Image (cartoon, rainbow, N blue to C red):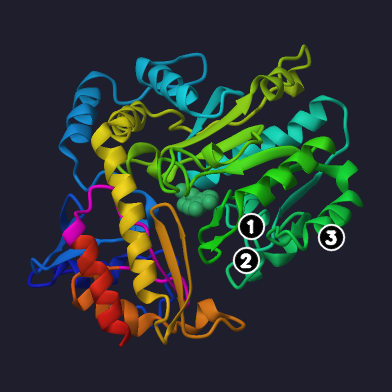
Amino acid sequence: MNTQNLTWAQRDSAVNWHPFTPIKTAGEAVAILRGEGAYLYDENGKRYIDAISSWWVNLHGHAHPYIAEQVYEQLRTLEHVIFAGFTHPSAVALSEALLAVLPENQEKVFYSDNGSTAVEVALKMALQYAYNRGEKKTKILAFRQGYHGDTFGAMAVSGRSGWTEPFAELLFDVIHIDLPTAENLPEIQAFVDQHADEVACFVYEPLVLGAGGMLMYEASQLDTLMRYCRSRHILLVQDEIFVGFGRTGRMFAADHLTEKPDIMCLSKGLTGGTMPLGVTTCTGAVHQAFSTDNVYGTLFHGHSFTANPLACRAALASMDLLKSAETQAAIARICKQHEAFRARIATHATIHAVRQQGTILAMNIGDNGKDAYFRNQCKPVFEALLQKGVLLRPLGNVLYLVPPYCISDEDLQYVYDSIIEVLS
Ligand SMILES: *Cc1c(COP(=O)(O)O)cnc(C)c1O
């Protein structure tokens, strides 16, 4: 192919297949050549405010010099090493740093390389925990509108929708429940009760169901559900892949809860959005069930790039930045600004169901009916905002902000004003 005189976007169209993108109507992708702080720059030099943290991964801004420096040093020291029978300082230091801030019952860290794999590991841990103890528990409890990733196991424990329809018959048996409210909790418990003896674990996104439409629910209801599951010996698998690392206003969603999970999944913001890395942590009791004389009791799972040193080093650097007073103040500032904007749009004619959990702000635009996601009601909104230099990528009819913590007050105001302008 003669690529002379073609743009990056044109060359891309010829060779790349993009995620979650209907091919026929997609058009050209926007080619980003450079990022700095909350900004992305395309091949024409146009600047965009990345108000969704590039699919919820970025915490401290693009091309952060401190993370870059740390990764470069790691790259010149040790780029990768097998993690079975071997280890390296960045993995050790990162596990120590994570366990210091996770709920205190978390004791061991298992590495993989993205969010879906972190969930796969968690599911295998929970199912084999039962197997190793000689219990027959093969069912999994999950929220009807949950999302846990795109690999088969993660897809199986997610909600059923158009995304999973082509594979419906191949997805394993999951007991789906609704989000808990004060009214339906007794009903949910009675329903779960009928299956409880066969259920290995309850997999859930705490406080915010991300890809399911930024649905939010109360910490107190989740605590009740967690307590109930614990009483029925159902392991608790808390998927903080999206909400972890400050998104909810606190370090983890766990910091809003009194109950503690048995297993936790982390990814996305883990490396500050720099590199793919997944983490599954567990309690000492879960880990202990795999300490057996029977070789089949081993967790036979591992990825080539398990605990990649570059990714671990990026995560360590991101943790340094996240714990700084400056970032903590920025998170508090974003929460406050969101609150003020919520008040401003409370009575807006076309914005409904405005909701917030910390730095995550979401609202519904247009109607909520069947297949709302696939009707693309927000496509004109997405395009108009892009024109104005604001990157917001609605989920169906749900428009939401998940800004990187480095975003300035002025830029956040510009994003709010642009939303109002585009919707009027
Ligand atoms: C994004 C996401 C995943 C999947 O992570 P990937 O890295 O995209 O595979 C799992 N769970 C939740 C809650 C997520 O938001």
Picture coordinates of residue 22 (x, y %)? 44, 76
- Judged by depth in the image, the label closer to the viewer, 3 or 2, is 3
Q: Nearer the viewer, residue 230 or 281?
A: 230
Ligand 1 is within 8 Å of the C-beta of the residue at disc 3: no
Which segment is the magenta one?
392-410
Where residue 104 sits, quadrant-wise, is: top right
* Residue 287 locus on image (x, y percent): 67, 21
Where residue 403 sits, quadrant-wise, is: bottom left
- Circle 2: is it few (<14), some (14-19), or many (20+) Cα within 10 Å? some
Question: Label 1: which residue?
Answer: 158
Do the residues under discs 1 and 2 have CB atoms within 8 angstroms?
yes
Dot label at residue 164: 2
Between disc 1 and disc 2, the foreground one is: 1
Q: Residues within 10 Å of mark 1 (few under 14, many from 20)?
A: many
* Furthest residue in direction top, as rendered: 293
Which element is circle 1 on?
A: loop
Report the Cα–Cα distance between label 3 and label 2.
27 Å
Looking at the image, which residue is at 84% across and 60% down? 187
Q: Write the residue at 40% across / 38% down.
A: 270
User: How far apart are the alpha carbons under marks 3 and 1?
Assistant: 21 Å
Left or right: residue 191 compared with residue 267? right
Which is more toward the observer, 76 or 216? 216
Does residue 393 show up? no
Of the image marks 3 and 1, the number of the one nearer the N terminus: 1
